[in-house]
Every structure is written in structure tokens, then in C-alpha cells.
Amino acid sequence: MSKLVFDAIGKYIHPTRYRQIVETQSLHALDDKEHRALSEDQKHCSVVAKVHYQKRRSRKVAVKAHECLQKLQGTKGSEVDMEVNTRFGSSSTSSTATFEPAMECARSENTQPKVDTPPHSNRLLSQGHQRRLLRFTTREDDCLKKGIDKHGFGRWTSILRDPDFCFQKGRLADSLKKRAELRLLPNENP
């Protein structure tokens, strides 16, 4: 279909617009079953709906849609292929990679590993364990004071990375800043 669009307008079109054109053209040129297969393939290739649709369907959706696209293009597709190759030369990107999104989608669907995502509540529990409060020790307070003397106030990353000072694993520069503001700066309210 993109070959037909390129032949008609001679320029690149946005993928969302391309899907709209395919939907409209397939509605008029294909029977209902072929239109549904092509429509589902377009949803497969959509970046927004990729996760939703690709987890549920197999490769046969893309293959069936590719057959429908071939039927829709007819012999015109190979003529446009030759014209594109003469315009841009064969040294540029291959026309099959540029002009056959249905096959590209089918290939990417096969190569993507299936990942089992844990239910939402399990993810929240696991994230809760990852983020725990790191309390400052007196040794860290001393290192922070010495680091400010050595590197200056506001150089939190330098202080944190300095090998002379030992901070807990997982300590962030922002936590050094907050601790220094809390402990080392004089209170503004008497």
C-alpha cells in the first residue's frame, strides 16, 4: 500500500496517516474478511497498540494481511518498486524494508521474546522493597562535613564519588544535599 501512496504523492507519509489510508482503501477494495485481517494487522503494527495486540495473536495475522496487501497492490507494486529503485538507486535502503511494513511487523513479532509481566499488585510490592529508607550514620555525617570542607557546599556528586569518604551503597547526591541542609545549615527560625 505504501508503494501506491508513494506512487501517488511521491513522498513519505506519517505511519498514522498510512494506517488511515490502508483502512479506507481496504474497505473499498477487499471483502469483509480480508478487510478485518488487514485492519487487525494495522493495529498490530501501531506502536501504541503493539503490546495489547501482539501478546494475543500469532504470526498468521501478519501473513494473512500481507497476502491481502499483495492482492490490493496487484502488479502495480512491482512497477513502483522498479521506479523507486531507479529514482533513489539500489545503494540506498532496500525497498522491501521500507515498503513492506506488514512483513516487518511479522518479523518483529517473531523475534520479540514473550515476557510475562507480573500482575499490577505484585509489581507494586516488588517496587516497595526496592526503595527503602537509608538512614544516615554518624560516620556518614562526619564524611559529609569533611566532604563539604574539601569540595565545597553544593558539590554533592563529587563528595559522594570521592574515595576518601564512605557512604552507604544506594546513597544519592540529593540525599546528601537534604542532610546537609537539615543538619549543617543554621536554622533560620529562632
Image (tube, rainbow, N blue to C red):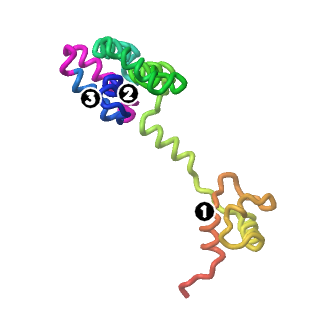
- Looking at the rendering, the stretch of residues picked out in magenta corresponds to 27-53
Callout in the foreground (1, 2): 2
Q: Nearer the viewer, residue 84 or 183?
A: 84
On the rendered structure, is 41 left or right of 125? left
Amino acid type at image mark 1? Asp
Q: Which residue is painted at 36% across and 16% down in the image?
A: 79
Q: Nearer the viewer, residue 183 or 41?
A: 41
* Disc ID at residue 45: 2
Q: Mark 2 falls on what kind of element?
A: helix
**Residue at the disc numbered 3:** 21
* Disc ID at residue 83: none
Secondary structure mainly formed by the magenta segment: helix
**100 relative to 145, above or below:** above
C-alpha gap between disc 3 and disc 2 = 14 Å
* Disc ID at residue 174: 1
- The reply to whether residue 151 is in sight is yes
Q: Quadrant of the C terminus?
A: bottom right
Tell me if label 3 and label 2 are in contact, CB under 8 Å: no
